[in-house]
Amino acid sequence: MSRLLSTIAIALVLSVASASAHDEEPTQETCDAAVAEARALAASLPADDVSRYFAERDIQQALVEAGNGEFDDCVEKAEQAALEVRERPHSLKPGERLNILRADELPPR
């Protein structure tokens, strides 16, 4: 019985060790690489492109998360920015424009 429990305990320890090796937490370097890739993709769009605007907001949030030590959230936001550029889900019709308010402005009524 003791041998069986020892075998089970060893198998459990080995499985946990191998799982943690595969599921490593992102690091500052991982975050920096993801942000750099997202920035390069966003820079490929015209400056007035609405998808670039949203991608740049995601990149900014990724940098905030990195500053807070939340590298997994940083990588997630950088991936969202890259996805925004690749899929370009936001678009404006000809003549439309994105009305971006400053922090001290209120929307017109």
Image (cartoon, grey):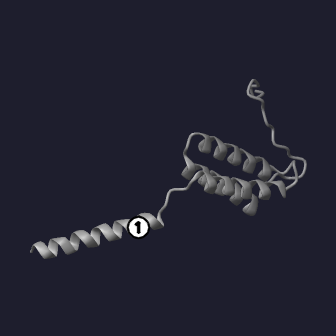
Horizontal side, residue 73 vs residue 6: left or right:
right
Q: Residue lying farthest right?
A: 95
Give how far across and how far down residue 53 sits, in percent.
78, 47
Q: Residue at x 70, y 43 (%)?
A: 60
Q: Residue lying farthest left?
A: 1
Horizontal side, residue 62 vs residue 9: left or right:
right
Q: Residue at x 40, y 69 (%)?
A: 18
Give how far across and how far down residue 30 sits, in percent.
62, 57
Q: Is residue 62 visible?
A: yes
User: In which image quadrant can residue 1 be found?
Assistant: bottom left
104 or 26: nearer the viewer: 26
User: In which image quadrant can residue 16 be found?
Assistant: bottom left
Q: Residue at x 81, y 38 (%)?
A: 99
Give how far across and how far down residue 41 sits, in percent.
78, 59
Horizontal side, residue 51 vs residue 96: left or right:
left
Taking 61 as reference, is 42 above or below it?
A: below
User: In which image quadrant can residue 83 be found?
Assistant: bottom right
Type of residue at label 1?
Ala
91 or 39: nearer the viewer: 39
Assign a secondary structure to mark 1.
helix
Quadrant in the picture for the C terminus: top right
Query: Which residue has dot 1 on it?
Result: 19
81 or 87: nearer the viewer: 81
Give how far across and how far down residue 31 sits, in percent.
63, 53
**Count of picture labels:** 1
Q: Is residue 89 visible?
A: no
Neighbour class for label 1 at 10 Å: few (<14), some, many (≥20)? few
Q: Residue at x 16, y 71 (%)?
A: 5
